Image (cartoon, rainbow, N blue to C red):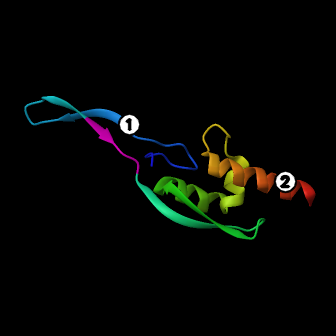
Amino acid sequence: MSRKCDLTGKSAQVGHKVSHSNRKTKRRFLPNLINVTLQSDALSQSVKLRISANALKSVDHRGGLDAFLIKAKDADLSPKALEIKRKLAKKLAAV
C-alpha cells in the first residue's frame, strides 16, 4: 500500500535530519494518513478511503465528500476516488 492520500495526492517528501553538529542525513517526511469511512449523500453509500488528516479537514470545510470530489482535480485523485467521482457526476447529470 502506497503512502499517498487518496483524495489530495499528498505523498512522502524527502529532506534532511540535521543533528546538533549540523550533520545532515536523509529522512522521509510521511503524510498523516488515516483510514476513514465517508458518506456520499448523492450516491447514498459509504466509502472507505485512506486519506490524510489535512484532506479530512478539507472535506469537512467544503461540505462533505460530494462537494470535495466535484471541485477536485482528476490528476490528484486515486483510481478508487476517480470511480466515485464518475458515479457522482453521472448521478448528478441524471437529476
Place of residue 63 in the rendered image (x, y in percent of width and height, measured from the top left): 67, 62
Picture coordinates of residue 46, whole percent (x, y): 65, 69
Judged left or right of residue 45, residue 27 is left
60 to the left or right of 40? left
Of all residues, the one furthest to the left in this rendering is 21
Numbered range of the magenta stretch: 27-31
* Above or below for 56 versus 45: above
Q: In the picture, residue 47 is in which quadrant? A: bottom right
Q: Quadrant of the C terminus?
A: bottom right
Magenta stretch: includes residue 22: no
Where disc 1 sits, the SS reads strand
Query: Where's residue 9, x and y in %?
Result: 54, 43
Residue depicted at 74% across the width and 68% down the height: 41
Q: Main secondary structure of the magenta part?
A: strand
Q: Amino acid at mark 1?
A: Gln
> Which numbered marker is on residue 90?
2
Q: Amino acid at mark 2?
A: Lys
- Do the residues under discs 1 and 2 have CB atoms within 8 angstroms? no
Q: Residue beneath label 1, please?
A: 13
| Position in image of residue 43 (x %, y %) | 77, 65
Few, some or many residues within 10 Å of mark 1 (<14, 14–19, 20+):
few
Q: Earlier in the sequence, mark 1 or mark 2?
A: 1
As drawn, is 80 to the left or to the right of 13? right
- Name the residue rendered at 73%, 51% in the picture: 85
Q: Is residue 70 above or below residue 91?
A: above
Closer to us: 9 or 53:
9
The residue sitting at 49% across, 43% down in the picture is 10
Q: Residue furthest front?
A: 1
Q: Mark 1 or mark 2: which is in front?
A: 2
